[in-house]
Amino acid sequence: MRVSLFVTCFNDTLFPHTGRAVVRLLERLGCEVDFPLEQTCCGQMHMNSGYVREGAALARRFARVFDGAAAVVTPSASCAGMLRKHVDMPVHELSEFIVDRLGVEDVGAYFPHRVTFHPTCHSLRELGVGDRPERLLRAVRGIELVSLPSADECCGFGGTFAVKNAEVSSAMLADKVRAVLDTGAEVVCAADNSCLMHIGGALSRQRTGVRTMHLAEVLAA
């Protein structure tokens, strides 16, 4: 299957290793991956900040850039959710593409570490990916997957929410970090690097030794 990767501006700028992990993973699963160089932001940041006209224009540009793609895959549930509202084309979050379109749960990964998974708000509430990421993680050889207490609670990032409501965001983050630490995990994993950046910042500042990794990086291991 030919797949077009929408890496997102967030990953392209701050977490390029996630994009590379997605390519390795999809190629391992027999996909031919292309990367349209003209891609830019999907417009979600603009939409969330009230710039509807500008956000919609970027979504339309996305549709032109990816026109004709058999399937678009992105390692960001939040961007996938944004695009499904505004463009009429197949845009898949990584885990749902692997499980639903490729029909695979065991991707051939090996990751001998204690891991907990944070299901991000957009993946749970907007896309409804359910337990697909956990099903993929449970099939990873060597992994010890431990449940995250109060997993469905927001980490407090919420894009510009963390800037506009810093004190509330910090309180929510403190609860999430405590839940992560209670698991004794070495790694906290999620399907959105935006949430992982927020959680990882607190874990790093507190010198916890807990790492953050995108789902794609664990599955590509």
Image (tube, rainbow, N blue to C red):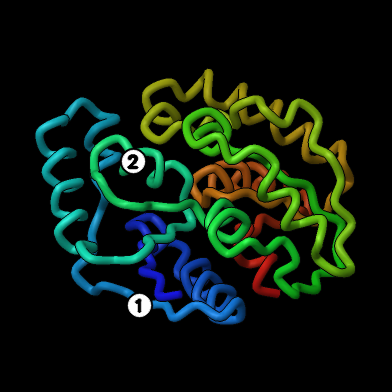
The picture quadrant where one finds residue 164 is top left
Label 1: element kind: strand
| Residue at the image position 61 percent from the left and 22 percent from the top | 171
Name the N-terminal-most of marks 2 and 1: 1
Residue 206: x and y in percent read 72, 44
- Left or right, 217 with respect to 71, comes to right
| Residue at the image position 53 percent from the left and 25 percent from the top | 169
Spatial CA distance of label 2 from label 1 is 20 Å
User: Dot 2: few (<14), some (14–19), or many (≥20) neighbours within 10 Å?
Assistant: some
The front one of 134 and 210 is: 134
Looking at the image, residue 44 lies above or below residue 169: below
- Marks counted in the figure total 2
Q: Which residue is mark 2?
A: 84
- Left or right, 29 with respect to 1, comes to right
The picture quadrant where one finds residue 55 is top left
Q: Which residue is mark 1?
A: 34
Residue 11: x and y in percent read 42, 60
Residue 33: x and y in percent read 42, 77
